[in-house]
Image (cartoon, rainbow, N blue to C red):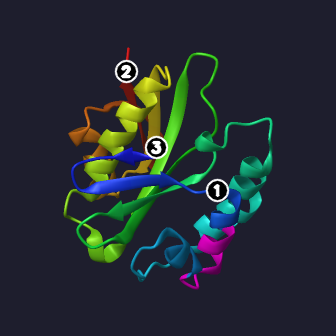
């Protein structure tokens, strides 16, 4: 678990991920938090079912680098977004991060704060750098990275690539 000034960021277990996908508030009940109006996109549902759940179930992998981490706003005791790492650190100590904030909680700095908290967590895990890709049109998403001192390190026709070097 990671805690920041306003947030608790909690990695979900395999069984909690199954409840997350069901989206029937059973996860909120287990975590003893208030119900949230979260919408699971088709892309996220596919990632959960085809990649995240199988990776979390693989006992040869450290699930913390495969699972969804839920972001809980302390003041409302409610889930406000999620983030994840895309696998364990590479040979050169880099991990990829992805994230999303629920619409009603956007533009309040929660994701910037959550990413900052996860950078501090990654540093404690001896990760050397974080990588992220954002759509060029998603100003809010790459602004989160800019506010956390990520540096643009490349691009494709549709994406910007970002890196944050810890050491």
Q: Which residue is label 1 attached to? A: 13
Task: Work out whether 115 lies above or below 121.
Answer: below
What residue is at 27 percent from the left and 47 percent from the top? 4
What residue is at 26 percent from the left and 37 percent from the top? 148
Residue 53 visible somewhere in the drawing? yes
The circle drawn on residue 166 is 2
Discs 2/3, front:
2
Discs 1/3, front:
1
Q: Give the percent coordinates (x, y) of residue 142.
A: 31, 48
Q: Give the percent coordinates (x, y) of residue 6.
A: 23, 56
Q: Quadrant of the C terminus?
A: top left
Q: How many marks?
A: 3
Q: Give the percent coordinates (x, y) of residue 124.
A: 43, 25
Q: Which residues are magenta?
A: 18-25
Looking at the image, do the residues carrying marks 1 and 3 touch, with CB atoms under 8 Å apart?
no
Apparent side of residue 77 relative to residue 19 in the rendered image (left or right):
left
The alpha-carbon separation of the residues under discs 1 and 3 comes to 25 Å
Q: Which residue is label 3 attached to? A: 133
Asked if the stretch drawn in magenta spans residue 38, the answer is no
- N-term mark: 2 or 3: 3
Apparent side of residue 78 relative to residue 20 in the rendered image (left or right):
left
């Amino acid at each position: 678990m990671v805690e920041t000034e306003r947030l608790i960021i909690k990695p979900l277990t395999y069984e909690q991920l199954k409840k997350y996908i069901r989206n029937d508030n059973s996860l909120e009940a287990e975590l003893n938090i208030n119900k949230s109006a979260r919408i699971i996109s088709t892309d996220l549902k596919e990632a959960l079912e085809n990649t995240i759940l199988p990776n979390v179930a693989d006992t040869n992998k450290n699930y913390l680098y495969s699972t969804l981490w839920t972001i809980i706003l302390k003041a409302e005791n409610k889930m406000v977004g999620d983030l994840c790492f895309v696998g364990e650190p590479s040979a050169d100590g880099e991990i990829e991060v992805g994230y999303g904030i629920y619409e009603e909680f956007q533009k309040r700095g929660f994701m910037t704060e959550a990413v900052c908290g996860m950078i501090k967590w990654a540093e404690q895990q001896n990760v050397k750098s974080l990588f992220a890709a954002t759509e060029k049109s998603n100003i809010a998403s790459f602004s989160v990275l800019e506010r956390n001192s990520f540096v643009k390190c490349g691009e494709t026709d549709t994406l910007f690539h970002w890196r944050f070097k810890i050491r």
